[in-house]
Amino acid sequence: MKFNSFLYSLRQGLKNILRNKFYSLASLATMVVCIFMFGIFTAIVVNVNHVVREAEKGVAVVAYFDEGVTDDQIAKIGDFIRSREEVENVTFVSAEEAWQEFMPIYFGTEDPDMAEDLAQDFAKDNPLANSANYQIYLKDVSKQDQLVKDLSQVEGIREVSSNNTVADTLTNFNSLLGYLSIGIIVLLFAVAVFLISNTVAVGIAVRKEEIGIMKLIGATDFFIRAPFIIEGVVIGLIGSGVPLIILYVLYQRMQTFVSDKFGMLTGILSFIPAGEIFRYLVPVSLCIGVGIGFLGSMLTIRKHLKV
Amino acid sequence: MIHMDNVSKAYSTGNPAVNEINLHIEKGEFVFIIGPSGAGKTTLFKLLLKELEPTSGTITVAGQELNHMKRRQIPKFRRNIGVVFQDFRLLKDRNIYENIAFAQRVVETSPRRIRREVPQALSGVGLAERYKAFPNELSGGEQQRVALARALVNKPQLIMADEPTGNLDNQNAWEIMKMLEEINEKGTTVLVVTHNREIVDAMKKRVITLEEGRIVSDEKEGGYTDEV
Ligand SMILES: Nc1ncnc2c1ncn2[C@@H]1O[C@H](COP(=O)(O)OP(=O)(O)O)[C@@H](O)[C@H]1O
Ligand SMILES: [Mg+2]
């Protein structure tokens, strides 16, 4: 298709949209809602994921040894743990180190001098004598249960402790939200396709006579169809562009709002920067918008424009 | 230009609308097709434009065999033919200039050529001044002249007019027929369906008469008066 013909089709497509405002607006509104919800759900899911991953970093599986285990055995266990795929890294914590770490909590003071004094009394008798352990950090927290199970079987290991309820809950919540949003969005997209195909059908009905003349004059199928495809695609483009702009503004507002009001939580509630989310959200949403517009008009064209 | 061999067309209902027709029209001819209402004249035109498929027989138009033509070749083929109808079929939402430019846009003519050729086509039918008018601001005769200009603007080899004067008074009818004759004298083949007895008799052209889907007469300088 020549450039001038494209411009002509574009003009006709825009005319179609303006000519039946009611249907165009209905389709547009549905598209806007679709993409808006898609954007919100994406932002939530991505951010919760981010929080989970941050939380996971701090969570370790801790493996304690049997009484009287040899250094050799400990080294072997260490090798075994390191050999596992899901393990990010392993740190050995000796009984002394464990005690040093635990002391301030135990004595209820952060003051090292005071703790030192109190510790003197325990020096010969480390209450955590059996608490040498491996702290194991995972790449993927969902593999934690399996690892705990396997480690409990290993000889020389007395106890494996893990604390994963927070991460688990968040992960479950996130996948639930993910499925729910996919369900709602697919439904809305179907409605959008339906409405756009109806909008285009109205346009075709209005231009029935014109299409008849075009066929007799020798217009190609493509030339006859182009304005209607453009009509659908333009609705899709506007319908995804507008909510993206709104989402961007909202996201940044909310980020500032949360860090103003809940400043002390920023460590936990760290938002992914808008730029990082929108770098993917914008092209994906525009593609979805254009795709839905194209699909909607194609469905109608195939039905009503048998050339 | 046109060759039809043993062509029949039956709609799903009733007798064939076109029945075993053999028809040959050479390049540069001017031919009237007459006959009562329901004789199959419009059906014949639709077969020639490949709007309809014949039930049997072969059709060749402008050197192209229609039976084996692929769907996507149809648009190119139709660009050889200019069509005119009784009801004009102008686009009411745009002015005269745009109506004619439309025919060129549809076949992807360059804007430069459109700007040059639309005014030429309009002055060819004596409406150069009215290019801004809308169809409903013109008389029937003027509207049909616009339709004729639209049919001609892409310089087809063949013009097919289905009762072009059916909605016109005698003077306007004559004007349109004279224009068709001029077009024919410049080399375009012209095929006209009409009920206008006076004009057919006066113009002394080849006349083909259809009745119930069959050709009942085909005369070199025919007219209504010869039969009855
Ligand atoms: N689409 C159609 N479906 C069924 N029958 C048709 C159709 N079009 C025309 N006919 C019939 O075919 C015959 C020829 O019609 P037509 O070609 O329009 O005649 P004319 O143009 O000479 O008046 C008529 O009997 C008409 O009723
Ligand atoms: Mg007819």
Image (tube, coloured by chain):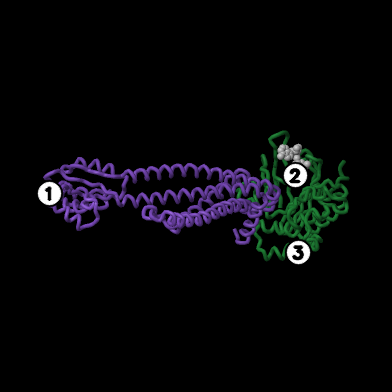
Which numbered dot is residue B42? 2
Query: Which tint was used for chain A?
Result: purple
Task: Establish whether ligand 1 lies closer than 8 Å to the Cβ of label 1.
Answer: no
Q: Is residue B3 left or right of residue A29?
A: right
Q: In this orientation, does residue A44 appear?
A: yes
Q: Amino acid at mark 3?
A: Gln
**Most distant residue in the top direction:** B14
Say which of marks 2 and 1 sits in front: 1
Task: Establish whether ligand 1 lies closer than 8 Å to the Cβ of label 2.
Answer: yes
Q: Amino acid at mark 2?
A: Thr
Residue B195 location (% of width, % of height)? 83, 46
Q: Is residue B119 left or right of residue A236?
A: right
Asked if marks 2 and 1 touch (Cβ < 8 Å), the reply is no
Chain letter of disc 1?
Answer: A
Residue for point 62% across, 49% down:
A25
Residue for point 42% across, 48% down:
A45
Pointer 2 local density, CA inside 10 Å: few below 14, some 14–19, many at least 20: some
The secondary structure type at the circle numbered 2 is helix
Q: Which residue is mark 1?
A: A125
Q: Is residue A23 left or right of residue A123?
A: right
Give a yes or no on whether discs 2 and 1 share a subunit: no
| Frontmost residue, A184 versus B19 | A184
Asked if marks 3 and 2 touch (Cβ < 8 Å), the reply is no
Whole-Å distance between the Cαs marked 3 and 2? 30 Å
Residue A212 location (% of width, % of height)? 69, 48
